Image: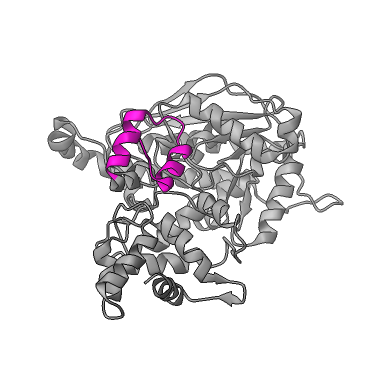
Amino acid sequence: KKIMPNLHSTLNDALNLDKATAKMMALHPKLKFRMADPFHYKEKQKTFFQKYIQPFGTFLLFPIRLIGALASLAFTNVWAQIAMFGYRPAYDDEGHLRPLSTWRKYAFYPAVYSFRAFLACLGFHYIQVKGKPASKEEAPIVVANHISILEPLVIGLLHIPMIVAKNAMRYYPGFANLLYATQSILVDRKNPNSRIDCINDITYRTNHPEFPQLLIFPEGTTHDENSLIHFKRGAFIPGLPVQPIVVRYPNNGFNPTYTVRGPSLPRMMLRCLMEPYNNIELEYLPVYYPSEAEKADPDLYASNVQKVMANAMVSPLVTSHSYFDHQLLTHALKKNPSIHLNTSLNHIHAQLTQNPFQWNRERNDYYELMDSFATLDKSMNSCIDRNDYFDAYQSKASLDSLERAYQHLDVDNTNCVDFHDFVLRMAPYYSKEDGLLSPTSAIDSFTADHM
């Protein structure tokens, strides 16, 4: 049974998609948007107790929790400042940061207990741990799936590691001192030099015996809890053993997923404070020792570790989506709140680079085309159907001419041109040898050529 090419590419991204699901997606093409979108947010079904009785208890519990959370976080920061009192970063002859002295590390330990109290105030009374955490000697690097902002807090509590985090974290109230005290690595993802420095720091510190373990979330951004997205290569460039951790949030009263579609950060923290209890489970998988081929190829190493983690999860959706998709979706939602990305930019880009087009993923190409796509998608169902296309061009051509043009755009004959197909059809017109056309000019050229 025929499955559309763009749908077939989406199916290849998933590890556990059975034939019945594939058939259903083929018969209902619009359904694929939600099934293949790792940034989708779904509220959990509440029980009668959670819906009607729990709010009365929450009314009394919330102010106590809030005061306790603020107080414990304040104590944690005080201990962090004491541990770093008088500290001046010291560097070796090659410009590498030296590890903290032993007394500073011990002085920071009281902060661990006050931070545990902070997590308890957020409803995490018990942290369920499966498997055995490895030592720094066994696994210098710890990698985990990234669902919410909560995993760095919980794993950080258990390991007191260095963390690779975005530079903006230094401005988060209450957490800047913790990152400073753990000598975490902050990276500006928009700055190529910062990314290179980050890789150099990862390689140096993971090979240095006096630095603690390094915690990295190789996906680089958050997504829904039933997905795994593209693993970046940074954690795997040193070629050292890593210990994967699979994070789950079982039986929670609300979905703690922090995605572009979900609740804002303040609202999510508020929800944590209002729940009687929150569950989190950390499953420590066996240490993964890379082969010589994996040491030589960080992308292969990253992909194989991702497969190991996927096998430990329950029917995950594994896609090639990445941080770029997250940013593009954030941009697109400003124009179309219901839009979905049914395939990843990595997949689209791989197809585009097989053709002689001038294309740069990090330029504004995709953003500009997304703006045009969202403008044409007047029905706001993440696809351009005949009505959308005809409404845009009916003043410029006859219906017969537009029908012929639309058939070239909708090669699968589904009356649904998604963003994946839209980019592939527009690329020859948008990216010319003599320079870039505007998206509007590219669409006009396409329409004129196929009428």
Residue 19 sits in which quadrant? Answer: top left
Residue ID at (36%, 51%): 412
Q: Quadrant of the C terminus?
A: bottom left
Counting the numbered discs, the total is 0
Residue ID at (54%, 47%): 220
Horizontally, residue 262 falls left or right of residue 149, namely left
Whole-percent x, y for residue 335 in the image: 33, 66
Horizontally, residue 168 falls left or right of residue 135, namely left
Q: In the rendered image of this protein, does residue 353 appear above or below residue 162?
A: below
Magenta residues span 1-28
Inspect the magenta stretch and tell me whether residue 10 lies in it.
yes
Colouring convention used in this rendered image of the protein: one colour
Q: In the rendered image of this protein, does residue 17 appear above or below residue 203?
A: above
Instruction: Tell me the chief SS of the magenta region.
Output: helix
Whole-percent x, y for residue 341 in the image: 40, 52
Horizontally, residue 73 falls left or right of residue 43, namely right
Residue 253 sits in which quadrant? Answer: top left
Whole-percent x, y for residue 307 in the image: 54, 30
Residue ID at (40%, 37%): 225
Which is nearer the eye, 23 or 370?
23
Q: In the rendered image of this protein, does residue 46 appear above or below residue 263?
A: above
Which is nearer the eye, 198 or 128?
198
Residue 331 sits in which quadrant? Answer: bottom left
Outermost residue on the right side: it is 93
Inspect the magenta stretch and tell me whether residue 44 lies in it.
no
Residue ID at (34%, 61%): 407
